[in-house]
Image (cartoon, grey):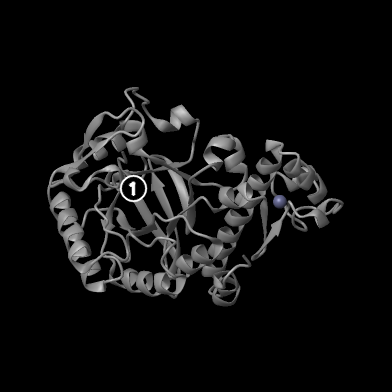
Amino acid sequence: MSKKLTFQISHRYQSMRTGTVKVNGRQLATPAIVQTGSALTTLTPAELKACGVQAIKQDALDYWRSVADYGDLHALLGWPGVLVTAAGSEQAYRWAKPRGRKQDGVSFHDPDNGQLRFYTPQDALAEQKRLGADISQGFARDAGYFAPVDDLNAAAEQNARWLAGQPALAGNLAPIVGGGLLRVRRASLNAIPAAVAGYSIMGVASNVPVKEQSRLVTEVVGMLDETKLRYLPTAGDLHQLAAMLLAGVDLLDSDLAGREAAMGNALVGAERLHLDRERLASDQRLLADHCKCPACRTGVSRATVHHLLVTEQPVGERYLLMHNLFTINQLVARIRDMIAEGQVPAELRKFAAPCDQ
Ligand SMILES: [Zn+2]
């Protein structure tokens, strides 16, 4: 767990800002994408770095369920950058039966071996500390965006009790729940101790229309202590990603690069190029003109990637993954520059408009 986390804001533009997170000798330029998903199992740490990845996320519950002692994940994974961990409480809640949702934790049957486990906020904190998290997250109950008001209130009250019973640790992000209700979001926020590093805005899932996500996140961001980190633990599409950056989120989880690569898609500007289409079978151009990603730097053509995909060779998806990761991280780097120069909206709103499907 962090000995000390500092967040220095350099430039502001509307709700957005650029900044630097320094933690445990590591550094992160914000806004930034926290990489999740298949990229972490498919690419080496050096490849991730070459694609502009600054931070990766791991789920503490996955490690806690195992009997092995993994130690510090920077060492285990060979990852030198910032490590973000999730408590994994959402997953524990999904596995739990209603009577397993207790005042002091969650009991569930482990889907791997059927064993009954009881996961508590203290376990989540201790596990994230053991894993060497640079940025960790509080245990949270989240009823979901469209839950009935009573459930949203109950979740906020439960989190408030957990926050009151825990030491505030540096590097820890506290959950803000409450679905689409600003009143409940505010109550959730009021329970958060001043010493936290930032806020994790929960429950803004991909089943919520992006316009509604923008409305809510903009309003929630307006209530927060502006010196603290704003984190959205939700993987989204390019549309959501841009909209959430516009709303002023500093850190945003995403496995977009991997999901698109798995579907055979290359991100090209605000569009998707479907590499499995027959018309690309003899297209000798790069995935995107002038792209400097590790895949395009090898000179690999659309035709080659098309061939690799249709003959089911995994390297095809690897090329797409590297290209997509690089493209997304380049976009976010450009957004950082644009915030610094005070000229964001036109460029970013192009991406915030719906992508082709
Ligand atoms: Zn490329």
Quarter occupied by residue 346: bottom right
Q: Which residue is mark 1?
A: 5
Q: Is residue 81 left or right of residue 301?
A: left
Q: Position of residue 96 (x, y in %)?
A: 25, 43
Q: Residue furthest top?
A: 68
Q: Which is more toward the observer, 173 or 18? A: 173
Image position of 65 with respect to 185: above or below:
above
Q: Quadrant of the C terminus?
A: bottom right
* Ligand 1 is within 8 Å of the C-beta of the residue at disc 1: no
Q: Position of residue 41 (x, y in %)?
A: 54, 36
Q: Position of residue 193 (x, y in %)?
A: 18, 56
Q: Which is more toward the observer, 29 or 77? A: 77
- Residue at 30% over, 30% down: 114
Image position of 226 with respect to 128: above or below:
below
- Residue at 63% over, 52% down: 324
Identity of the amino acid at label 1?
A: Leu
Label 1 element class: strand
Number of disc labels: 1
